[in-house]
Amino acid sequence: MCDECCATEPEDGDYVISSCGYLGSGTQVSVVGDKGAAVFKDEEEAEDYVRSRMEGERFYPNVWFLSDHGNLEIRKGL
C-alpha cells in the first residue's frame, strides 16, 4: 500500500469500486490484476464487502473509486 499522497493510479491488488448496470443501478468491486468482479445493490454494501475481505485476508491495499466520468480517487477510511 502506498501513501495516498504518492498514489496516482491503482496498482495490482488494489480495490476499485465503480458504478455498473443500467444507469448506474449497481456497484461493482474489482481487484486490479484479478479476473472477475463482485456486484452489489449499492455503494455501502460494496464497501462492507471490501472491509470484510481486507480484514479476513489481513491485507489492506488502497481502495479507489472510479466515477462515471472516469475520475479516480482514493477512498479514505476503508
Image: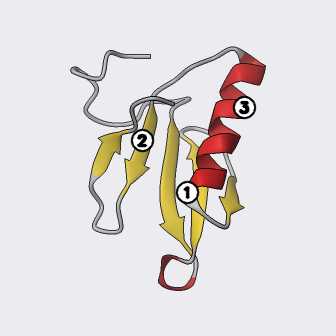
Please give the residue where the numbered disc 2 appears in the rendered image.
64
> SS at mark 2?
strand
State how the image is colored: secondary structure
Image location (x, y in percent) of residue 77? 45, 29
Left or right relative to 16: residue 27: right
Residue at 63% over, 17% down: 59
Please give the residue where the numbered disc 1 appears in the rendered image.
43
Residue at 50% over, 51% down: 17
Compared to 73, does 67 lie above or below? below
- Work out how far the residue at label 1 is from the one at label 2, CA to CA, in angstroms: 12 Å
- Work out how far the residue at label 3 is from the one at label 1, CA to CA, in angstroms: 15 Å
Q: Are marks 3 and 2 in contact (CB under 8 Å)?
A: no
Residue at 51% over, 32% down: 14
Compared to 47, does 12 lie above or below? above
Q: Which residue type carries mark 3?
A: Arg
Residue at 38% over, 54% down: 66
Image location (x, y in percent) of residue 49? 69, 42
Label ID, residue 11: none
Mark with earlier residue (3, 1):
1
> SS at mark 1?
helix
> SS at mark 3?
helix
Q: Residues within 10 Å of mark 1 (few under 14, many from 20)?
A: some
Mark with earlier residue (1, 2):
1
Towards the viewer: 52 or 62: 52
Nearer mark to the viewer, of 1 and 2:
1
Q: Are marks 3 and 1 in contact (CB under 8 Å)?
A: no
